[in-house]
Image (cartoon, rainbow, N blue to C red):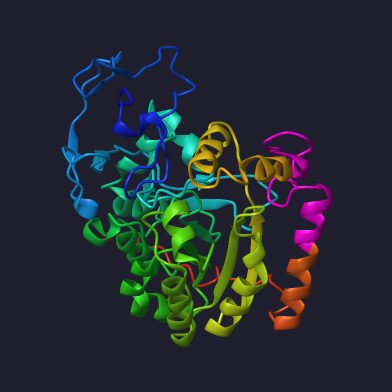
Amino acid sequence: MAQQQFPGDTKTPLKGRGALSNPHNRYNPQRIEPFDDGWGAQIGIQTDDMQDEWDEGQQGGDDPFEARRIETIILKESSRSIITTNKSPDIPFDRSINPYRGCEHGCIYCYARPSHAYWDLSPGLDFETKIIIKPMAASLLRETLNRPGYQVKPICIGANTDPYQPLEAKLETTRSIIEVLSEFNHPFSIITKSGLILRDLELLASLAERRLCSVAVSVTTLDNDLKRKLEPRAASGKVRLDVIRQLNEAGVRVTMMAAPMIPCINDQELETLLAAGKEAGAAAASYILLRLPLEISEMFQDWLAAHFPDRAAKVMNIIRQTRGGKDYQSAFGQRMRGSGVFAQLLKRRFEIAYRKLGFITDQRFQLDSSQFKPQREQLSLL
């Protein structure tokens, strides 16, 4: 499937979208270059003639013919597996499920953007406008959990892209996955920044009561103007704090993630975010320093130039100081926190605020795997 040209390839902001352009897919040796034909339209040359069945989504009320607006398009994936494994020592889980590939929230910093290149799509506007869905997710999960010899470990839902992004309101893929996990008494956690999770509050609360579920909510900023630029289709910080509050009141253990922290953009909010999260009922908190792997670096720099030209150079200089002079370092132990003076200061600020606010000191919360119960049909002896 070939990536398309968009009106945003002039690297100027588009309404409701985070990326300013559709950068080249690093796996495709052929490039698509926009040009002005003199009639007020940009034309791209598509080099891939593979035919795919696309379903047009209606999320956000976008009109593809309205100037500087882009529609959301849905692509169905024929999955053969549903659980992804990892061996990263930087994260507290080794199994995850991502109901969607790509994310309409459009967060410019999203570390999952480069994964869209595996689908011959751009990590830019393609990532937030071409969403790959998994219609068979629930049945695949049920089949996997029923396999003889399946070993139970907590599963993280949404480790890559948000499981409660706008499409979930219609498709309910994440809901169906949670229902299957509930059938099997299988422990899981969720990472989201969406208020849509409250739709499933009753179900999550019943599972949390049995230590089968926990939730992490990321809160990046309480500045709505910054939020609209940084995470154009995500919920406001106020809504996310309300999500924490309602989950906590329902008995669901919540961790607030102040992530990502971006030098000179939102890092000054760190203590404020932690205090607000604690007041809302978060049991624990964490933070992550901005990560700029692969194509994200160029895209983020374009975003800085468009929205914060007065400090763009300063932001990148500090980021490089935290990454050994590079835009990014992927080494375990450093990729989440960075190194150098700024990274050390950020870590110290977090530790002081964490202790003063009275967050729990032991974050090794354990979900219960002992309740797992396969749902295999019993064969009759007659």
**Which sits in the foreground, 75 or 343?**
343
User: Count of labels shown?
Assistant: 0
Residue projecting furthest to the bottom: 249
**Which sits in the foreground, 265 or 95?**
265
Query: Where, quadrant-wise, is the C terminus in this rendering?
Result: bottom left
* Coordinates of residue 280 in the picture (x, y in percent): 53, 82
Does residue 304 sit above or below 226 in this rendering? above
For image coordinates 48% across by 58% down, the residue present is: 226
Residue 366 sits in quarter = bottom right
Residue 343 highlighted magenta (yes or no):
yes
* Coordinates of residue 210 in the picture (x, y in percent): 49, 80
| Main secondary structure along the magenta-highlighted residues | loop
For image coordinates 50% across by 43% down, the residue present is: 112
* Coordinates of residue 371 in the picture (x, y in percent): 50, 72
- Decide if residue 266 is on the left or right side of residue 159: right
Q: Is residue 16 visible in the rendered structure shown here?
A: yes
* Coordinates of residue 68 in the picture (x, y in percent): 27, 40
Residue 129 sits in quarter = top left
- Decide if residue 367 is on the left or right side of residue 4: right
For image coordinates 17% across by 44% down, the residue present is: 63
Q: What span is in magenta?
A: 320-347
Residue 44 highlighted magenta (yes or no):
no
Does residue 116 sit above or below 101 in this rendering? above
